[in-house]
Image (cartoon, coloured by chain):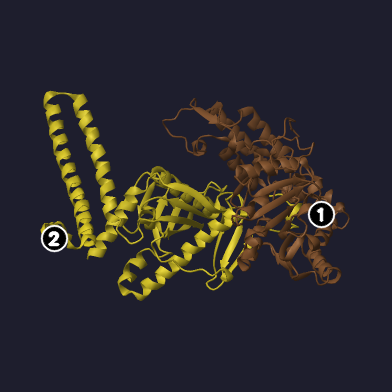
Chain colours: A brown, B yellow
């Protein structure tokens, strides 16, 4: 991890001495101040392509990792992010352009070699390599120590959108995103709320709160999203019973499964954001318990789970152990047909 | 010219501006026609001047001047070609951007390789024309090439030009994938779909009629998987039409792109349905229907590209495969224009 400890940049976090992390600037946002020649860049590109091609389906067979096709697509995106001029210059050299012409890039060429080696040989997640993840219509900054938001999680924003359309009162209320990570859900939701709608996003990790705050700033949402550091509901005690909505993508992988995860995840992403205890449901159960007192009557919740088994268990848990507290509790599947979410409303 | 006279007469009427909307339209059409006429006359005059100049240069023995005038003539030729094309693009949706879809025929790797050559030809063609090109959907072959691909070509008249390419394209060559070095014939089908502008009526899609699926899913998903692959396939249940996209960087964007393709496919289906009801259009529809073989590319034993609809042919397949398609498109468009006038 390359974290430099300088003065806190977070303006919204509850003051906490550990919030001293300076978030990294994603590659695509850095100024194109490095120069190289077209010939050297092409040489790198050829090398990078052959490294990607050499993988074949080895990672796919090993641990469901990326195959060559996917790596080659990522390589195109790396070029997209790294080059100040259009990437087509690599594929379609204009006849008049000579090999010595200068190309402006956002990091030095040596670093591009290092980055692509890390991607392929160390299985460093592509999103950490370029420092960002495209999620919904957002481009979020991510770095080591912060969970890379998953495509499945995008759907929680759609679920919130549906709930708001059914009950407009939710649009201008207070929302909570618990374990916000990069701030993805908090930002996605803040953008569909009304002028009075607010989101409080919490995370135990100082790196996550720093990165989330940075992302909130990049989307000019400081007025709407407040990032607070702390465990689950702890930083929200002042707002007990005031929430019209709660969302979370908590760690839900059973501890015993952590060792067998795909290298990109197991070796590089923060265990804090993945490991949900023996059954994987420690945090999900804690969230269901806490939601009872945090939500206003009629308030909405949507939590992500590990899939069918956990979702079924939680629905059963709520119906038996939290009898009468919630209504319209149901499971919602993701685009792969897995029951990925549970949603419901606080009883009135 | 007749139209111009009619418009001039109307413009000279005293009561024209009693209806300002009508007057504005007449005056705009008049202006635009006048411009075109002036353009043609200017080209004519330029042409005469340069021919005189060449004669003069030859008399004076001034090779530099001659060369310059020859260059100018070449420029005029290009310019005239462009004008001719523009005149041919008067169809209702010709001004639209479009999707170009390429699908490999039977024959495994050889035809998948041909499909990627055809796709590359269109990408280069579109780039030369200054259009925006982006890959929406691409299914690579196991060994080489592509099974199918969809690109979006963004710019004025993209559909008007590209619609000339609809049909089956045939390649004859010694296959690089055949160790026995035998001659192979492969086929690729090309479809072109206009992306209708805001002004057009578009088919209403009900959210509940859509089935959205993750592509190449499998495994646990969620936190257990970190993948940059977020392709989705959308099926319009009532028609069975599908669209997919995997080249965007988020699932949300892939879904939006796939939905845009689906919308255009449904629009095209609806246009075809309406055209069928309208006998007048049936003629032009058959010309661009899917499944007809329209062009042959021969790399061996001789070298030639021949359009089977217009009999236009060239002996340099490489330049065609590098995107030099305008002559084929132009000759097809003029042939269809002549047919329409008959």
Q: Where, by quadrant of the figure, is residue B76 drawn?
A: top left
- Residue designated by label 1: A253
* Chain label for disc 2: B
Marks 2, 1 in one chain: no
Mark on residue A224? Answer: none
Relative to B280, is B292 on the left or the right?
A: right
In the displayed orientation, state which residue is furthest to the right. A278
* Chain label for disc 1: A
Question: In percent of the image, x 56 and y 59: which residue is there?
Answer: B244
In the displayed orientation, state which residue is furthest to the front. A238
**Disc 2, disc 1: CB below 8 Å?**
no
Q: Residues within 10 Å of mark 2 (few under 14, many from 20)?
A: some
Q: Is residue B85 above or below residue A122?
A: below
Residue mark closest to the camera, 2 vs 1: 2
Q: Position of residue A297 (x, y in %)?
A: 74, 67
Q: Judge by depth and name the residue closer to the eye, B117 or A27.
A: A27
Q: Residues within 10 Å of mark 1 (few under 14, many from 20)?
A: many
């Amino acid at each position: 991890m390359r974290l430099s400890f300088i003065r806190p940049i977070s303006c919204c976090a509850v003051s906490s001495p550990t919030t001293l992390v300076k978030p990294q600037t994603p590659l695509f946002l850095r100024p194109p101040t490095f120069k190289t020649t077209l010939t050297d860049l092409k040489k790198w590109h050829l090398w990078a392509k052959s490294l990607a091609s050499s993988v074949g389906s080895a990672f796919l067979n090993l641990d469901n990792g990326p195959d060559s096709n996917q790596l080659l697509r990522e390589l195109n995106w790396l070029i997209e992010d790294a080059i100040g001029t259009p990437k087509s210059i690599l594929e379609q050299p204009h006849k008049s352009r000579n090999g010595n012409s200068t190309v402006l890039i956002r990091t030095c060429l040596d670093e591009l070699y290092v980055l692509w080696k890390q991607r392929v040989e160390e299985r460093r997640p592509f999103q950490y390599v370029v420092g960002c993840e495209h999620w919904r219509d957002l481009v979020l900054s991510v770095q080591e120590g912060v969970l890379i938001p998953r495509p499945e999680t995008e759907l929680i924003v759609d679920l919130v959108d549906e709930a708001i359309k059914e009950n407009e009162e939710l649009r201008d209320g207070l929302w909570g995103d618990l374990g916000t990570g990069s701030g993805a859900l908090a930002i996605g939701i803040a953008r569909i709320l009304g002028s009075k709608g607010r989101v409080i996003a919490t995370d135990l990790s100082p790196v996550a709160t720093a990165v989330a705050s940075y992302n909130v700033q990049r989307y000019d949402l400081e007025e709407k999203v407040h990032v607070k550091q702390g465990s689950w509901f702890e930083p929200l005690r002042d707002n007990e019973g005031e929430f019209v909505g709660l969302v979370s993508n908590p760690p839900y992988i059973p501890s015993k499964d952590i060792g067998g995860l795909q290298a990109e995840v197991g070796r590089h992403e923060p265990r804090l954001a993945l490991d949900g205890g023996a059954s994987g449901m420690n945090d999900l159960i804690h969230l269901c318990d806490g939601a009872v007192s945090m939500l206003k009557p009629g308030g909405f919740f949507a939590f992500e789970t590990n899939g069918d088994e956990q979702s079924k268990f939680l629905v059963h848990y709520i119906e038996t152990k939290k009898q009468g507290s919630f209504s319209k509790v149901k499971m919602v599947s993701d685009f792969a047909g897995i029951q990925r979410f549970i949603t419901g409303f606080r009883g009135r | 010219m007749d139209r111009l006279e009619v418009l001039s007469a109307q413009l000279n009427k005293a009561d024209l501006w009693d209806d300002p909307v009508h007057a504005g339209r007449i005056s705009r059409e008049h202006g635009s026609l006048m411009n075109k006429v002036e353009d043609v006359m200017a080209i004519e005059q330029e042409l005469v001047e340069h021919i005189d100049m060449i004669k003069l240069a030859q008399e004076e023995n001034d090779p530099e001047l001659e060369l310059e005038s020859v260059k100018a003539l070449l420029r005029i030729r290009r310019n005239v070609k462009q004008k001719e094309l523009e005149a041919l693009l008067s169809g209702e949706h010709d001004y639209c951007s479009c999707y170009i879809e390429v699908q490999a025929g039977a024959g495994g790797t050889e035809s998948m390789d041909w499909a990627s050559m055809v796709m590359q030809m269109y990408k280069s063609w579109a780039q030369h024309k200054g259009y925006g090109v982006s890959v929406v959907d691409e299914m690579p072959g196991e060994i080489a090439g592509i099974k199918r691909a969809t690109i979006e070509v963004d710019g004025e008249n993209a559909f008007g030009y590209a619609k000339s390419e609809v049909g089956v394209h045939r390649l004859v060559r010694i296959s690089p994938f055949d160790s026995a070095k035998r001659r192979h014939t492969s086929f690729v089908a090309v479809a072109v779909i206009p992306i209708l502008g805001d002004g057009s009526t578009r088919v209403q899609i009900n959210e509940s009629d859509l089935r959205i699926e993750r592509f190449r899913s499998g495994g646990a998903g969620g936190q257990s998987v970190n993948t940059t692959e977020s392709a989705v396939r959308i099926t319009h249940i009532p028609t069975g039409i599908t669209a997919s996209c995997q080249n965007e960087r988020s699932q949300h964007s892939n879904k939006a792109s796939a939905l845009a393709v689906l919308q255009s496919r449904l629009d095209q289906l609806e246009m075809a349905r309406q055209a069928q009801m309208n006998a007048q259009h049936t003629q032009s529809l058959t010309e661009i229907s899917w499944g007809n073989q329209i062009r042959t590319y021969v790399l061996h034993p001789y070298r030639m590209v021949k359009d089977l609809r217009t009999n236009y042919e060239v002996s340099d397949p490489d330049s065609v495969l590098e995107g030099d398609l305008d002559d084929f498109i132009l000759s097809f468009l003029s042939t269809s224009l002549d047919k329409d006038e008959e």
